[in-house]
């Protein structure tokens, strides 16, 4: 079992509602956004989908979410 990067509660990496951290290089499109990630590296870091959603809204760190 792993822990969520944001709330530190347990996550099940095989759950479809879990995010896995990926690092790589992006080339920006002229219309904005990312076209693709090159040299993609999958990390052994996990997060609940609702924790990622909260982080996208600007909430970070220990969130204490169930």
Image: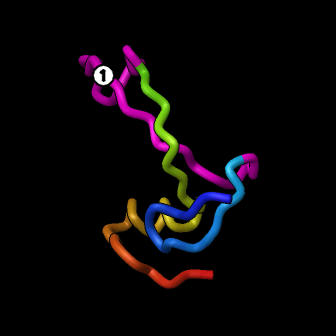
User: For the point 63% across and 81% down, which residue is it?
Assistant: 66
Quadrant of res 29: top left
Measured as percent of width and height from the top left, residue 35 is found at 39, 19
Q: Nearer the viewer, residue 64 or 36?
A: 64
Q: Is residue 39 left or right of residue 11?
A: left
Q: Per the image, is 38 magenta? A: yes
Q: Among all residues in the image, which is located at the extreme right?
A: 15
Measured as percent of width and height from the top left, residue 34 is found at 35, 26
| Dominant secondary structure, magenta | strand
Q: Which residues are magenta?
A: 14-39
Measured as percent of width and height from the top left, residue 39 is found at 38, 15
User: For the point 64% across and 53% down, which residue is it?
Assistant: 18
**Residue beneath disc 1:** 26
Q: Is residue 7 left or right of residue 17?
A: left
Q: Is residue 43 left or right of residue 19?
A: left
Whether residue 14 is situated above or below residue 59 in the rendered picture? above
Q: Among all residues in the image, which is located at the extreme front?
A: 1
Q: Secondary structure at mark 1?
A: strand
Whether residue 16 is situated above or below residue 9 in the rendered picture? above
Q: Nearer the viewer, residue 23 or 36?
A: 23
Q: Per the image, is 15 magenta? A: yes
Quadrant of res 2: bottom right
């Amino acid at each position: 079992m792993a822990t969520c990067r944001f709330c530190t509660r347990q996550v099940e990496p095989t759950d479809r509602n879990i995010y896995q951290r990926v690092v790589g290089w992006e080339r920006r499109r002229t219309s904005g956004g990312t076209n693709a990630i090159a040299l993609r590296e999958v990390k052994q870091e996990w997060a609940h989908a609702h924790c990622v959603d909260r982080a996208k809204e600007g909430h970070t760190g220990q969130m204490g979410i169930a």
